[in-house]
Image (cartoon, rainbow, N blue to C red):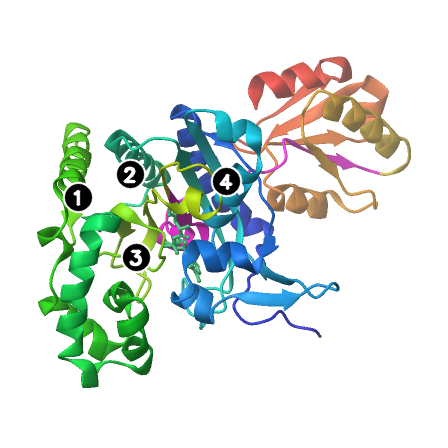
């Protein structure tokens, strides 16, 4: 037997109803906010992520699946969706010219992390990105959308953490203070953070190492340094959230593990996922488009992990979708009549199934139950003679005779 590599999952049909329920809930919310779907490649040139996410982040420095193609170019399986969507937006002249673009996407992402509950090497995200506006309304719109999806899928207790990490100009003063603080604690820092202290001190705030993270409580907070413009922006985001009755908690150290953020950062967290407490996160990235060679264009977005959401709602009953009709026959002419009826029903959009082998009624009824069929339709010899099917309602157990030509109407009207 060949097994799957660590940190990847097979999703069998019994999990698919929940999976589709989550995706459909997200899609219907995206639609209600007027977002349109974009599909971008699963692999990109490595530079897309190195430039977009930042070489000092854990994602880029330790977690990417990178390989050379036959021409010796470095490719990477996308660890997240934003960088690829920005690359596509910049490369495509048409969308790039529109004043506001609202995209959503979903699909697999790859990070070479240590696998555990809720932390996979191939996982799936859905997310959204808005390009073209500095307006804090869009930060609110994105957070509000994640909030609506979370409620719609039935995640019952979660917290929204928000912060502002300022812009290029106000962040530089903060970085100096942050570096001074951590320098005075140099010996307590892990090897990576000792290096990051020189290259990218903001990353120290999201180091998971215990000794580094315990230093965070006394670190200077960025909110004491942000400029009036960033302050005003953050206040407005909160005002919109208050208006929408969306509760949030301010976390002055929420910098998130990707380098592209400016101003607003946020995470949706729960205490039900063990070590992985966030099931969604995002923020504003006003310089990313120009970093990719596009004209300066602000952006804001989020992504949520489908596997983590599924873990949070695994106790929630989901209507398992079964087939509409399971046909039960006695072989020979009875099977031929069944095949003809099945063809007609399927063309009318009614889902049908049948076992072509001749088996006893008991075993066929068992299969109808396993397939979660709404109706069992029995076509025995009597039924072939009378041209009337015996239809059993699998919910109530009631049976009735329905002429062959009225079968589709009967199923459609009663399913
Ligand atoms: P992120 O916080 O790295 O943000 O990932 C978003 C979500 O993906 C997490 O909250 C989590 O639910 C899920 N996730 C991340 N890593 C794993 C993993 N190893 N296994 C399972 N689930 C995981 C981003 O990816 C940004 N692109 C979000 C964004 C969009 N910011 C702006 N626009």
Task: State the extent of the magenta-drawn residues as a range.
Answer: 302-330
Find disc 4 in the rendering and name its residue.
Answer: 105
Report the label total.
Answer: 4
Residue 143: numbered disc: 2
**In the displayed structure, does residue 273 sit left or right of residue 242?**
right
Tell me the quarter of the image containing the N terminus: bottom right
In x, y percent, where is residue 8? 55, 64
Q: CA distance from mark 3 to mark 2?
A: 15 Å
Find disc 3 in the rendering and name its residue.
Answer: 256
Q: Compare marks 2 and 4 and give the one earlier in the sequence.
A: 4
In x, y percent, where is residue 285? 34, 45
Mark 1 and mark 3 in contact? Answer it, CB < 8 Å: no
Mark 3 and mark 2 in contact? Answer it, CB < 8 Å: no
Q: CA distance from mark 2 to mark 1?
A: 10 Å
Residue 268: numbered disc: none
Find disc 1 in the rendering and name its residue.
Answer: 248
Q: Please, what secondary structure does the residue beneath circle 3 have?
A: loop
């Amino acid at each position: 037997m060949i097994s799957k590599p660590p940190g990847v999952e097979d999703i069998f049909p019994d999990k698919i109803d929940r999976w589709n329920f989550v995706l459909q809930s997200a899609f219907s919310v995206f639609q209600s906010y007027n977002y349109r779907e974009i599909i971008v490649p699963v692999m990109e040139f490595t530079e897309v992520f190195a430039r977009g996410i930042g070489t000092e982040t854990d994602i880029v420095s330790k977690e990417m699946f990178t390989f050379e193609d036959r021409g010796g170019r470095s490719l990477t399986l996308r660890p997240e969706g934003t960088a690829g969507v920005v690359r596509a937006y910049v490369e495509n002249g048409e969308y790039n010219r529109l004043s506001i673009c609202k995209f959503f996407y979903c699909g697999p992402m790859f990070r070479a992390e240590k696998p555990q509950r809720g932390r996979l090497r191939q996982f799936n995200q859905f997310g959204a990105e808005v390009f073209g506006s500095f307006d804090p309304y869009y930060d609110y719109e994105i957070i509000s959308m994640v909030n609506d999806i979370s409620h719609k899928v039935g995640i019952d207790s979660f917290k929204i953490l928000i912060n502002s990490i300022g812009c290029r100009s106000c962040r530089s003063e903060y970085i100096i203070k942050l570096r001074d603080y951590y320098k005075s604690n140099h010996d307590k820092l892990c090897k990576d953070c000792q290096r990051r202290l020189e290259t990218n001190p903001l990353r120290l705030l999201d180091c998971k190492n215990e000794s580094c993270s315990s230093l965070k409580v006394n670190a200077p907070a960025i909110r004491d340094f942000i400029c009036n413009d960033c302050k005003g922006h953050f206040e407005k985001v909160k005002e919109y959230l208050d208006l929408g009755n969306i509760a949030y908690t301010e976390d002055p150290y929420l910098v998130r593990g990707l380098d592209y953020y400016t101003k607003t950062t946020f995470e949706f967290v729960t205490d039900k996922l063990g070590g992985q407490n966030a099931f969604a996160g995002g923020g504003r990235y006003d310089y990313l488009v120009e970093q990719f060679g596009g004209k300066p264009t602000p952006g804001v977005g989020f992504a949520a992990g489908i596997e983590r959401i599924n873990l949070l709602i695994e106790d929630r009953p989901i209507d398992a979708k079964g087939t509409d009709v399971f046909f039960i026959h006695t072989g020979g002419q009875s099977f031929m009549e069944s095949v003809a009826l099945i063809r007609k029903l399927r063309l009318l959009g009614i889902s049908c199934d049948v076992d072509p082998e001749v088996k006893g009624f008991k075993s066929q009824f068992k299969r109808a139950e396993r397939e979660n069929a709404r109706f069992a339709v029995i076509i025995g010899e009597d039924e072939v003679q009378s041209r009337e099917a015996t239809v059993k309602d699998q919910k109530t157990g009631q049976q009735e005779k329905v002429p062959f030509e009225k079968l589709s109407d009967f199923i459609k009207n009663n399913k």
